[in-house]
Structures are given as C-alpha cells and as structure tokens.
C-alpha cells in the first residue's frame, strides 16, 4: 500500500490529480489509515498510470471512463476500443489540419509584415479580428 504522494509519483501525476480521479470514481476509494491518510494498492496505481497515459494521448475524461470500463472486462471484444481509438484519430487529424491552417496564416502575416509599428502589425490584426 502506498500513500497518495508515492502513488502520485509512480503514476506521474500530482497529488491533487489523484484526489480528483478518486473523487470522480475512476480509481475506487482509497483505504484510510488511523491518521486518515489515503492508501492506494498496486491496482489503483496501475489504473492511475493508465489514466495518465490516456490523457497524455489526448483522450477526454469521458473517453477514459469508457476505456476503463472496457479494461475492466478483458474478455470482451475490443471492437468498442477500436471505435473509440478511430474516433480519437479523426479528432487528432482535425486538430492537425487546424494547426496547419493556423501556421499558414501566421506565416503569411509575418511575410507581409512591414516591421513598422504595432498599430500596423499584421499578426496583431489577425488576433484582434478573432
């Protein structure tokens, strides 16, 4: 059993984040010591690591909940996992396209900059126009 600080460190999270995931019911309730310290077992620490990796890959909290539910049923078909992952890939592709368009617009604005004053700055113009 590990106290919250050690569990957080091993999972690569902040203590506050561990508390949040516990409050959200994503890792189960921690046991408590006589001094009211939280204690986490290896399964909970592994689950925290799973959540962190999924969040690092950009999955939403709701998607992580779905992935955890599926992970809790290892003998089930992985078809739903595939659907979630494919949907996430499509979202990543959309974000990449948006970033490429943003990059193109910024480069064009920089190329057209006359390097005079902020009032005439093309980059500031884009930001002000929303």
Image: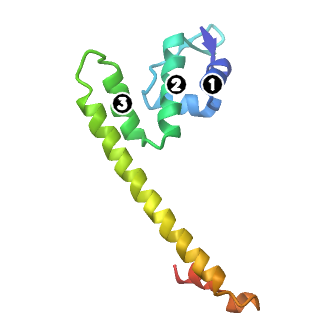
Name the residue that disc number 1 marks: 8
Q: Residues within 10 Å of mark 2 (few under 14, many from 20)?
A: many
User: Is tag 3's residue or tag 1's residue first in the polypeptide sequence?
Assistant: 1
Residue 36 appears in the picture as rendered = no
Residue 53 in percent (x, y) is at 51, 32
Residue 115 to residue 130: above or below: below
Name the residue that disc number 2 marks: 48
Residue 6 in percent (x, y) is at 67, 18
User: Is tag 1's residue or tag 2's residue first in the polypeptide sequence?
Assistant: 1
Q: Residues within 10 Å of mark 3 (few under 14, many from 20)?
A: some
Residue at position x 57%, y 28% in the image: 18
Name the residue that disc number 3 marks: 67
Residue at position x 56%, y 29% in the image: 19
Q: Secondary structure at mark 2?
A: helix
- Disc 1 + disc 2, Cβ < 8 Å: yes
**Residue 113 position by quadrant:** bottom right
Q: Residues within 10 Å of mark 1 (few under 14, many from 20)?
A: many
Q: Secondary structure at mark 3?
A: helix
Residue 108 in percent (x, y) is at 58, 80
User: Is tag 2's residue or tag 3's residue first in the polypeptide sequence?
Assistant: 2
The residues tagged by marks 1 and 2 sit, at their Cα atoms, a distance apart of 8 Å
């Amino acid at each position: 059993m590990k106290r919250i600080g050690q569990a957080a460190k091993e999972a690569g999270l902040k203590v506050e984040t561990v508390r949040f995931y516990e409050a959200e019911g994503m890792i189960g309730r921690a046991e408590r010591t006589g001094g009211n310290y939280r204690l986490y077992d290896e399964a909970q620490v592994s689950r925290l690591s799973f959540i962190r990796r999924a969040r690092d890959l950009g999955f939403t909290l709701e998607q992580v909940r779905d992935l955890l539910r599926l992970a809790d049923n290892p003998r089930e078909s992985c078809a739903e996992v595939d659907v979630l992952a494919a949907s996430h890939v499509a979202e990543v592709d959309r974000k990449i396209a948006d970033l490429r368009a943003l990059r193109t617009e910024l480069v064009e604005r920089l190329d057209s900059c006359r390097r005079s004053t902020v009032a005439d700055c093309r980059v500031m113009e884009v930001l002000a126009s929303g």
